[in-house]
Amino acid sequence: MEISHSIVIHADMDTVWNIFTDLTCWKKWSTVLRESSSDEDRLSEGKRFRFCLRPFAFPVHVEPRVEEVIPGKRIAWSATRYGIHARHEFVFERDNGAVLLTSREIFNARGIRRLLVRVPRRKLHRLSVMMLRELKEASEQAVKS
């Protein structure tokens, strides 16, 4: 299963990048990725971090490993939980003074494919869209300040 969404953020690349990669401020702007923590202040290649996601009534605690960080261009992380492997990549592109941010998440499961089918794709897509909108709002507010 793949979930993808893009959003245009009317802020400069440095602002968007810094807000997104600074784990210490996620609690200020994200209601989707809750309780984030890490041994590092920023998303760093090869490092793990933690967050809590609530796709349903129960929390899902995730500890992904950051696979790739290309400053101002791309971040990818992956994690396995409950037999489901997820890889989430974010592509940052300059777009006429703004930033086009694309989020793409790919889910794979062996032996429990039925569970993936039961997880509402729309619910996961909504969470992804909400996270991007919250990042957009935080970035555009930072530019106004």
Image: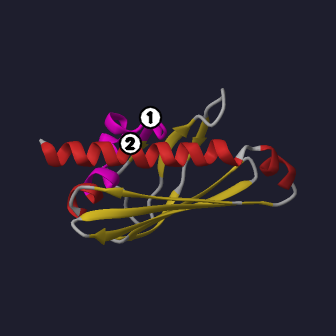
Q: Residues within 10 Å of mark 1 (few under 14, many from 20)?
A: some
**Relative vertical location of residue 46 with respect to residue 123 in this rendering, above or below:** below
Label 1 is placed on what type of residue?
Thr
Q: Name the residue tied to disc 2.
A: 134
Label 2's element? helix
Sequence order check: which comes first, mark 1 or mark 2?
1
Q: Is residue 73 above or below residue 44?
A: below
Q: Is residue 123 something that shows in the picture? A: yes
Residue 60 position, x and y percent, is 62, 38
Q: Is residue 105 left or right of residue 120?
A: left
Q: Position of residue 40 (x, y in %)?
A: 34, 52
Q: Position of residue 144 (x, y in %)?
A: 14, 44
Distance from the alpha carbon under mark 1 to that under mark 2: 8 Å
Callout 1 touching callout 2 (CB < 8 Å): yes
Query: Does 33 appear in magenta?
Result: yes
Q: Which residues are magenta?
A: 18-36
**Based on the displayed image, in which of its 4 quarters is residue 74 positioned?**
bottom left
* Disc 2 residue type (three-letter): Glu
Q: Report if residue 72 is visible in the image.
A: no
Residue farthest along the top direction in this orientation: 57
124 or 48, which lies in front?
A: 124
Circle 1 is placed at which residue position? 31
Outermost residue, left side: 145
Scheme of colours in the image? secondary structure
Location of the C terminus (image quadrant): top left
Task: Kindly indicate the quadrant of the structure image that contains residue 37.
Answer: top left
83 to the left or right of 35: right
In front of the other: 54 or 145: 145
Q: Secondary structure at mark 1?
A: loop
Which one is closest to the eye, mark 1 or mark 2? 2
